[in-house]
Image: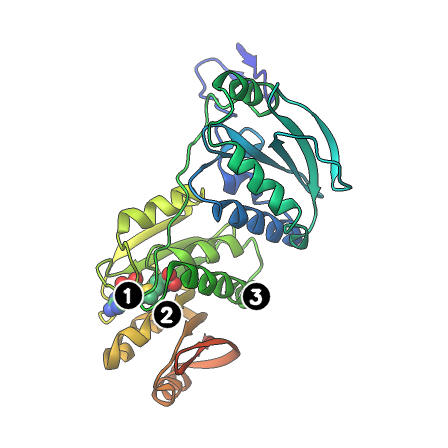
Amino acid sequence: MSGRECYHCKQWVKDGEEHDCWTTTEAALTQELSQDLRDAWERLRETAVSFGDQRIYASHKSIMFSRKCCYFFVRPKRNFLELCVFLGRTLKAPQVRRADRASKAKVYHIIHVRHRDQVEAPISDWLRQAYELSDGRASQASTDHVESKHAPKASRVLPNEVENFGTYHHTTPAESKRIREDAKKAFSKLLRPLYPRRAALRILDAGCGLGFLTYVAATCFPKASVTGVDLFTHGSVSEMSKDQAIKNMRSLGIESRTSFLTHDLTKPLPPDPQYDLAVSNLVFHNIGKKRFKAYASVFDALKPNGYFVIGDLFPHAKGDLDYFRERSRLIAELQEGSYGRWDYKIRVLRKE
Ligand SMILES: C[S@@+](CC[C@H](N)C(=O)[O-])C[C@H]1O[C@@H](n2cnc3c(N)ncnc32)[C@H](O)[C@@H]1O
């Protein structure tokens, strides 16, 4: 059979067959990680995103974090995340397994991370210093050298913008970020035990906004497909648009498993598909009395015994609880702080 062996992955490629083993996504590179490494990876990524503007993209076996040039990259391995951090000096610290000159201006440092608790000072400080150094002050000649000598070739990469999930009304961007960090932890804890991790689930994110919970659910279940439903016009989260939600999914490397539907939840959802799981965060308290119609839309769209995991303020909880009791069984409940007068609770309901 005529063809060639790929120089990079050694796979045999038949003549005329498309082959692009350098093109990959963050999701593809992280989907096999153990839970500890996934948590560490997520914290690492969030830490980097908090520094400011940058591009995050997958290339071959690495995920690159870059401003004018790459300031660090991560290679997910079976038992650890290998970080390569570019700094202007040589660090002497037990966390650094190897350091060497990458160019006249920069030294690369190899660090292994095995647990999310390691993603704090001093490692987070070194990453910030690397980020600050990479704003272009180093000469282009030296940055080209840094990228070409130690970073994977970036000639065929998928450049990503950093995602933006918007700011909730009545909060500052920093408060919204903290709310999401807490919600992400709490939802992940409640969602994971519901189904095997690799189940090919259909998930509904009711009132998805810019896709925050769409992302959390897709991360908990890496073989699931998630549909986000929203009006995409409501003012309860800033910078609302379906395009931004799609961009966020692309940036996170999960666009092939996610889709968005413009729909008013107070109206029935299309009868097909039926969902194994519905999730929702901070939506129904915005809808007033019509929320009962919206609850009905969600329960009607669930398969028998499907789960509805809802985080909200429940300002008039009795009515909501009565309704939930009619349609479902309460499996778990978590109180996650309070906003103003109201508690924020996440309830896991199983459709009866
Ligand atoms: C505070 S935002 C939360 C967004 C997202 N769940 C998150 O946590 O980032 C509330 C969302 O509910 C959506 N929403 C409100 N009423 C809705 C309705 N009747 N049908 C669909 N979506 C609605 C809004 O458009 C908004 O995106």
Q: Residue furthest top?
A: 2
Confirm if mark 1 falls within 8 A of ligand 1.
Answer: yes
Task: Provide residue 81's location: percent of width, then percent of height.
Answer: 66, 41
SS at mark 1 in the image: loop
Question: What's the CA distance linking mark 3 and mark 1?
Answer: 26 Å
Q: Nearer the viewer, residue 132 or 155?
A: 132
User: Which quarter of the frame holds ligand 1?
Assistant: bottom left
Q: Are marks 2 and 3 in contact (CB under 8 Å)?
A: no
SS at mark 2 in the image: loop
Which residue is the site of mark 3? Answer: 189
In-image side of 251 versus 4 (left or right):
left
Which residue is the site of mark 1? Answer: 236
Q: Are marks 2 and 1 in contact (CB under 8 Å)?
A: yes
Dividing the picture into quadrants, the one containing residue 251 is top left
Measuring 28% from the left and 77% from the top, which residue is drawn there? Answer: 291
Q: Earlier in the sequence, mark 2 or mark 3?
A: 3
Question: What's the CA distance linking mark 2 and mark 1?
Answer: 9 Å
